Amino acid sequence: MQDWAGSCQVRLVDGAGRCAGRVEIYYRGQWGTVCDDAWDTADANVVCRQLSCGWAVEAAGSARFGEGSGHIWLDGVNCSGDETALWNCSAEVWGQHDCGHKEDAGVVCSEFMALRLENSDGCSGRLQVFYNGMWGSVGSNSMTPHTAKLVCKELGCGDGGTREISIFYGRVNGTAWLDHVQCGESNSSFWQCPSDPWELQSYDDVRDETNITCNGRKPERTPVAACPNSTSCTDREKIRAVGGKDGCSGRVEVWHRGSWGTVCDDSWDMQDAEVACRQLGCGPAVSALAEAAFGEGTGPIWLEQVECRGTEPSLQACWARTGDGGACRHKEDAAVNCLAASSVTTSPPQRGNISSH
């Protein structure tokens, strides 16, 4: 493959960031996918390292991040894990395969990150980042005022916010990924801000935690009830992911009025997916998918215009419209990819600071 290696590029698509998603390769002027036949952690590690995304947390198959289109460029990839690029690995003849896009390969790398304010409204509370498979807080030392503003914008919670400073000492058992975060006017994203090197560390003083209150909230809508008899149906039993390989990815279906139905993708976003994944017991959301990415469901469409803040215990606790108005069809069924708890690693992070991402 060395004759074409110089013209190739690799990317991860339809994840929640550049370090998670469907693996796509650019070749001969077109982007195409990789078949999941024999796809494993060694192959995924090559992609993660190639993209400066750390190492592989998960080697995903079965179109975990939705089906691609166009060519399937590689099949039967078999990397040792030490290669500098995916196209340096052993594989079937370039462009030849026996796969469909339902078998598109994906990757979740250790550098995949997410941001949240840990409170019931999702727009205030303790600031936390998800990194290398786990949530950790952000230290408050030397934090600049502009940092709160960027966090609120990143979370869709308005164009400004303030950091709540506690003067009272209180003992806590916490872990933090970051400290001395100093966002400035030149930074357009929280992830661009300079900080101390990433390091998971313990703290025991509540004053070391960063708490932020944003000036915006998501619009409220009428809540929709779920199980007709809440004493016999738990939150976990009111939701399922259909069409994925492990119950942590697939079309989102909810239980209502004695039957399963789907969720319309109108306004479906990462905050909604975050709630769905947590309700499923599958960890944080990796991607929020639309347009029946895991196939069209049947029966009722129970919810549409779902507007979660991201911290609700269930989709049924979010604001939404009932889906009986006929505005949606099953070609608009919403879906999720979750980072299943069993797939994460807690190895030490390798990168330096926020601005390196």
Image (cartoon, grey):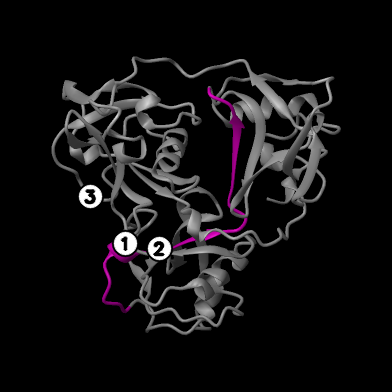
The residue indicated by pointer 2 is: 30
Q: Position of residue 293 (x, y in %)?
A: 29, 48
SS under mark 2 = strand
Magenta-tinted stretch: 96-120
Residue 288 lies in the magenta-colored region? no
Above or below residue 221? Residue 189 is below
Check residue 110 for magenta coloring: yes
Is 191 left, or right, of 156 in this rendering? right
Q: Earlier in the sequence, mark 2 or mark 3?
A: 2
Residue 230: percent from left, percent from top = 29, 27
Per the image, label 1 sits on a secondary structure element best described as loop
Q: Amino acid at mark 2?
A: Gln
Q: What is the CA distance from the residue labelled 2 to the residue labelled 3?
A: 26 Å
Q: Is 62 left or right of 322, judged from the image as shown?
A: right
Q: Which residue lies under the disc numbered 1?
A: 70
> In the image shown, does 74 or 44 lie closer to the viewer?
44
